[in-house]
Image (cartoon, helix red, strand yellow):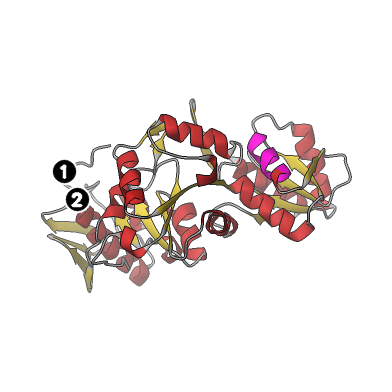
Amino acid sequence: MLRGTSQALTDHHDLAMLDLDGVVYVDGEAVPRAAEAISSAREAGLRVAFITNNASRTPTTVAEHLCRLGVQADAADVVTSAQAAARVLIKELGEGARVVLLGAEGLLEAVRSVGLEPVGVEDEAEAVVTGYGPDVLWRDVMRAAVRIREGLWWVASNTDQSIPTSYGVAPGHGVLVETLQRFSGVDPVVAGKPARPLLDETVRRVGGERPLMVGDRLDTDIEGAVVSDIAALLVLTGVTDLAALLAARPQERPTYLHLDLRGLLEAHPEVVADGAGATCGGWTARVDDGLLSVHGEGDETDWWRAVAVAGWAHLDATGDAASTGDLVGPPTPVAR
């Protein structure tokens, strides 16, 4: 269920597509060791792209933020769901098409950059495109909803249910998408993860024949890679905890797993599955009567690898995620 490698991932892949929040930074602050790992991966010949479902910020804004954190980045290294949505629109409608736009500056710039004409909700148009925008007016949402119900083609930048803010986790664009869906009875074409367009657009822009998706979220980053039939590295610097890992559905399971972005620079040992258990390095994980237990000692990442494979085998066999009891992680806590 996890793939072993005898060489570093930089030797197996020529493009790493890095999710941002939870991978490169958390709440706007750099993840420890992320900048150094990215620099070393580039020195080893790996192309690096920074991809995000956030459609509100422009690539230039994202790149400037990364540079402030010590991560070298140009606007050309950043690919957003807004750019992926614009590609979906231009491919279907052609240059010069008029598109109703509900969103922020990032979406506006992306639509204009491919030769589409953004217009208001009352204007003649061939499609509507939506993205997160804190200043979008409710009256515009209502008018767009009616037009979608009446048949106007709809592209959504993403379906993220939540976004991190300075005041806590808040509703994301996915909440608006669900509202429009319920009212109109229409499902949009989605550009962001886990749908394919964002990853396809990244490969088109940055290049690479052996891409690797790197993320912290199972239901967007990893599922997006599975949908796109590319390898994925899950890092544990973001939202995935032990319970979420054990409950991962087959389409949410990564190819590789590591504590952080240093996983790009290392070989990944094989995990040996045996009935109700799995062994990696010095650790053996088992699920007996629904309860997970881990024995042994060794590398912290190998603990997580053994636990993941044992947990997934149990989930597939029973349909239920293993109980963790008092377990929360390896005996030595991971530094955050």
Q: Is residue 226 above or below residue 74?
A: below
Question: The residue tagged with tag 1: helix, strand or loop?
Answer: loop
Farthest-out residue, bottom: 275
Residue 253: image quadrant is bottom left
Mark carried by residue 300: 2
- The answer to whether the residues at label 2 and label 1 have Cβ atoms under 8 Å apart is yes
The one nearer the camera, 288 or 143, is: 143
- Residue type of the residue flagged with mark 1: Thr
Q: Along the horizontal axis of the image, is 129 left or right of 15?
A: right
Using a 10 Å C-alpha cutoff, classify the residue at mark 2 as few (fewer than 14 neighbours), some (14 to 19) or many (20 or more): some
The answer to whether residue 272 is visible is yes
Q: Is residue 315 above or below residue 52?
A: below
The answer to whether residue 188 is visible is no
In percent of width and height, residue 298 lies at 12, 54
In percent of width and height, residue 33 lies at 29, 39
Taking the magenta stretch, the answer to whether it contains residue 111 is yes
The mark nearer the N terminus, 2 or 1, is: 2
In percent of width and height, residue 29 lies at 39, 31
Question: The residue tagged with tag 2: helix, strand or loop?
Answer: helix
Residue at 53% x, 58% y is 203
Residue 122: image quadrant is top right
Q: Main secondary structure of the magenta part?
A: helix
- Residue type of the residue flagged with mark 2: Glu
Residue at 43% x, 49% y is 18
Magenta-tinted stretch: 105-112
For the residues labelled 2 and 1, the Cα–Cα distance comes to 7 Å
Taking the magenta stretch, the answer to whether it contains residue 259 is no
Q: Quadrant of the N terminus?
A: bottom left
User: Which residue is under mark 1?
Assistant: 332
